[in-house]
Amino acid sequence: MSDETKTADAPVEVPAKFKSIVEAIEQMSVVDLNDLVKLLEKKFGVSAAAPTLAVGAPTPGGVGAEEKSTFTVELTESGPNKIAVIKIVKEVLALGLKEAKDIVDGAPKVLKEGLKKAEAEELQKKIQEAGGKVTLK
């Protein structure tokens, strides 16, 4: 028996302080759990997506490439209207004015990693409308 099998079969000890939360989650439907995950992602600015190993990593066996599921948004240039781009970065990343300005001034700079395609394209569109240049990786 491998270590993975032992770990997967072992019961999980839930600390007392999380017991009520875990019990509530156990009672939820899959749809409700999906909505909860989305809410937590928005509320805390995180992603439940598993981190990717490497961009452009070869697929097992070299058979066909899967479509990317997560994207990194990189600000490559602030463009002619830097103030508008700073405002967008400040809003999207929930930063203070100075932090947002430092990011825009330091372009090229990664803004967000692990975004779904639609979220990455939406962020790209906002920054491009403000006059900045963005690359999706």
Image (tube, rainbow, N blue to C red):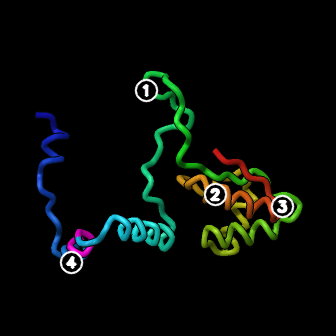
Marks 1 and 4, the one that precedes in the sequence: 4
Write down the residue under mark 2.
111
The three-letter code of the residue at mark 4 reads Ser
Q: Residues within 10 Å of mark 1 (few under 14, many from 20)?
A: few
**Where residue 102 sits: x, y (%)?**
71, 63
Q: Which residues are magenta?
A: 22-26
Marks 3 and 1, the one that precedes in the sequence: 1
Q: Is residue 25 magenta?
A: yes
Main secondary structure of the magenta stretch: helix
Query: Which residue is pictured at 81% across the width and 65% down the height?
Result: 130
Instruction: Choose mark 3 or mark 1, whichever is in front.
Output: 1
Write down the residue under mark 4.
20
Residue 39 shown left or right of residue 10 in the figure: right
Instruction: Choose mark 2 or mark 1, whichever is in front.
Output: 1
The three-letter code of the residue at mark 3 reads Gly
Marks 2 and 1, the one that precedes in the sequence: 1
Q: Which element type, helix, strand or loop, lies under badge 3?
A: loop
Instruction: Choose mark 3 or mark 2, whichever is in front.
Output: 3
